[in-house]
Image: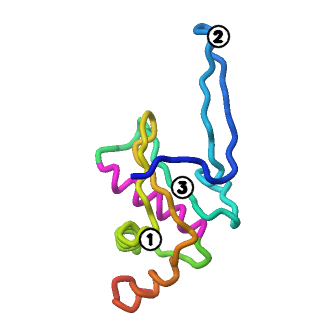
């Protein structure tokens, strides 16, 4: 996997922990937040965080769903929900999607390389009848 290093606009959020005389801080990359991605970004991120009300045993399936949600936001053409598994698998194989090393409350993450040929991969999967319209 790749380590998450902000290569987009990011900001620092800090919250004081007065009982410990410390601050809890986080660097937040805009390309990782839904609705904050910019068409100038070469990468977008999909992250899966712990939630008490869902089964988190299949992190890969949760990440696949998160990647498809982000692809629907960042690609210039629509993607169908039933394409999720094929696009995720082929995207990983072709380097369009890369695993991120995550920890803490973040169960899984992926970097989506928008500067790669997504249209070509989708056309190839359509020609092979792996994807259907």
Residue bounds of the magenta highlight: 58-74
Residue 65 shown left or right of residue 114 in the figure: left
| Viewer-closest of 63 and 110 | 110
Q: Earlier in the sequence, mark 2 or mark 1?
A: 2
Mark 2, secondary structure of its residue: loop
Q: CA distance from mark 1 to mark 3?
A: 18 Å
Give the percent coordinates (x, y) of residue 14: 67, 27
Q: Of helix, strand and loop, which one carries label 3? A: strand
> Looking at the image, is mark 2 or mark 1 nearer the viewer?
2
Q: Position of residue 84 (x, y in %)?
A: 40, 69
Establish if 5 lies above or below 104.
Answer: below
Circle 1 residue: 81
Residue at image location 49% in from the left, 49% down from the top: 47
Label annotation for residue 132: none
Q: Is residue 80 above or below residue 11?
A: below
N-terminal label among 1 and 3: 3
Q: Is residue 122 above or below residue 63?
A: below
Q: Circle 2 is placed at which residue position?
A: 18
Label 1 neighbour load within 10 Å: few <14, some 14-19, many 20+: few
Q: Position of residue 42 (x, y in %)?
A: 61, 64
Mark 2 and mark 1: span between their CA atoms? 46 Å
Q: Mark on residue 45?
A: 3
In three-dimensional space, the C-alpha distance between marks 3 and 2, rounded to whole angstroms, equals 33 Å
Query: Quick one: SS at disc 1?
Result: helix
Mark 1 and mark 2 in contact (Cβ < 8 Å)?
A: no
**Percent x, y for residue 50?**
43, 39
């Amino acid at each position: 996997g790749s380590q998450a290093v902000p290569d987009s606009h990011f900001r620092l959020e800090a919250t004081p922990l007065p009982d410990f005389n410390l601050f809890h801080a986080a660097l937040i990359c805009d390309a990782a937040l839904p609705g904050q991605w910019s068409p100038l970004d070469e990468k977008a991120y999909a992250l899966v965080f712990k939630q008490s009300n869902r089964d988190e045993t299949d992190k890969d399936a949760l990440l696949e769903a998160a990647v498809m949600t982000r692809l629907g936001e960042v690609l210039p053409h629509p993607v169908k929900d039933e394409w999720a598994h094929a696009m995720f698998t082929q995207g990983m194989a072709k380097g369009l999607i890369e695993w991120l090393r995550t920890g803490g409350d973040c169960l899984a993450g992926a970097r989506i390389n928008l500067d790669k040929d997504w249209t070509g991969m989708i056309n190839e999967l359509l020609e092979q009848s792996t994807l259907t319209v």
